[in-house]
């Protein structure tokens, strides 16, 4: 019985480690290239897939949090409304979207560049 518990523990550790590696491996460029996420006109990242993994959700949340902190800093420094900063950032990010990646068009739908 002890051998079975040891084997089960090793399997759990292996699964945990592989999940951790998979999460660490999901980068923004990879997620864009895989069509999981795309750029939105408000300068934030959006989820393109209908059933995103927790890794994709975490990547989007983290990226958007960092972007909003940056946008708020720029808006405050320049005494400019945040929505204007976001709109400018969105234009630049969509403009720099690589072929094959997604962006949100003016009607709110996802479009592949």
Image: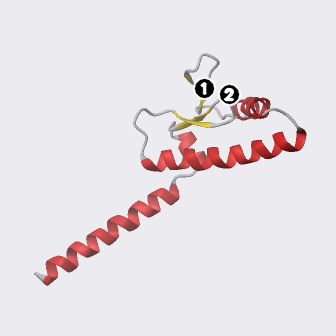
The residue positioned 64% from the left and 47% from the top of the image is 65
Mark 1–mark 2 CB contact (< 8 Å): yes
The residue positioned 42% from the left and 45% from the top of the image is 53
Mark 1 surroundings: few (<14), some (14-19) or many (≥20) residues within 10 A: many
Q: Is residue 30 above or below residue 38?
A: below
Dot 2 lies on which element? loop
The residue positioned 54% from the left and 44% from the top of the image is 31
Where residue 49 sits, quadrant-wise, is top left
Of the image marks 1 and 2, the number of the one nearer the N terminus: 2
Give residue 77's mark: none
Residue lying furthest right:
78
The residue positioned 43% from the left and 40% from the top of the image is 52
Mark 2 surroundings: few (<14), some (14-19) or many (≥20) residues within 10 A: many
Where residue 84 sits, quadrant-wise, is top right
Label 1 – label 2 distance at C-alpha: 7 Å
Quadrant (top left/top right/bottom left/bottom right) for the N terminus: bottom left
Q: Position of residue 16 (x, y in %)?
A: 36, 66
Q: Position of residue 112 (x, y in %)?
A: 57, 26
Q: Nearer the viewer, residue 98 or 109?
A: 109
Q: Which residue is mark 1?
A: 104
Dot 1 lies on which element? strand
Q: Position of residue 24 (x, y in %)?
A: 51, 60
Residue lying furthest left:
1
Q: Is residue 13 above or below residue 72?
A: below
Side of 112 relative to 94 (left or right): left
Q: Position of residue 27 (x, y in %)?
A: 57, 51
Give residue 41's mark: 2
Where residue 18 sits, quadrant-wise, is bottom left
């Amino acid at each position: 019985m002890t051998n079975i518990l040891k084997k089960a523990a090793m399997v759990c550790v292996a699964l945990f480690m592989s999940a951790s590696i998979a999460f660490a491996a999901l980068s923004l460029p990879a997620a864009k290239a895989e069509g999981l996420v795309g750029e939105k006109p408000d300068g934030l990242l959006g989820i393109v897939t209908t059933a995103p993994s927790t890794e994709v959700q975490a990547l989007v949340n983290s990226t958007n949090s960092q972007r909003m902190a940056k946008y708020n800093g720029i808006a405050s420094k320049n005494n400019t409304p945040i929505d204007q900063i976001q709109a400018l950032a969105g234009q630049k990010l969509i403009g720099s979207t690589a072929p094959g990646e997604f962006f949100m068009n003016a009607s709110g739908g996802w479009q592949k560049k």
